[in-house]
Image (spheres, helix red, strand yellow):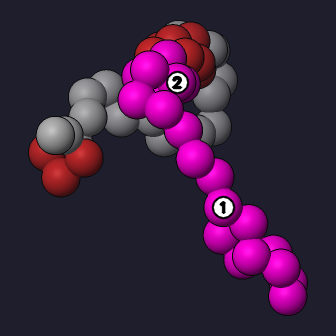
Amino acid sequence: MRAGTQMVSVALEKQQSALLAEKIDEILDQLISVEGNRFSVPTSTPGACRQ
């Protein structure tokens, strides 16, 4: 990731990535159920994003 003139690298272990994905999924599930939510949240993972 480039921030101005600096380059920033992020490294995650597989376990950390899996936990992060779980938490993001939980947050999206909560966001879907919020009354008056103005954001579009997909109900499933797009095919191009699945591994």
In the structure shown, which secondary structural element does the residue marked by tag 2 occupy?
helix
Judged left or right of residue 31, residue 49 is left
Q: Which residue occupies 85% across, 88% down?
A: 5
Q: Which residue is mark 2?
A: 16
Using the rendered image of the protein, determine whether residue 25 is visible from the camera's viewpoint. Answer: no
**Foreground: 49 or 4?**
4
Q: Taking 32 as reference, is 1 above or below it? A: below
Residue density around tag 1, few if under 14, some if 14–19, many if 20 or more, within 10 Å: few
Q: Check the image and report above or below for 29 versus 7.
A: above
- Horizontal and vertical percent for residue 47? 14, 45
Residue beneath the point at 18% across and 52% down = 48
Label 1: state its secondary structure: loop
Identify which residue, 40 or 24, lies in the foreground.
24
Q: What residue range appears in magenta?
A: 1-20
Image point (16%, 40%), residue name: 51
> What residue sits 36% from the left and 35% below the top?
42
Position of residue 30 measured from the top left corner of the image (x, y, whole percent): 56, 12
Determine if residue 12 is in view: yes
Mark linked to residue 9: 1
Q: Amino acid at mark 2?
A: Gln
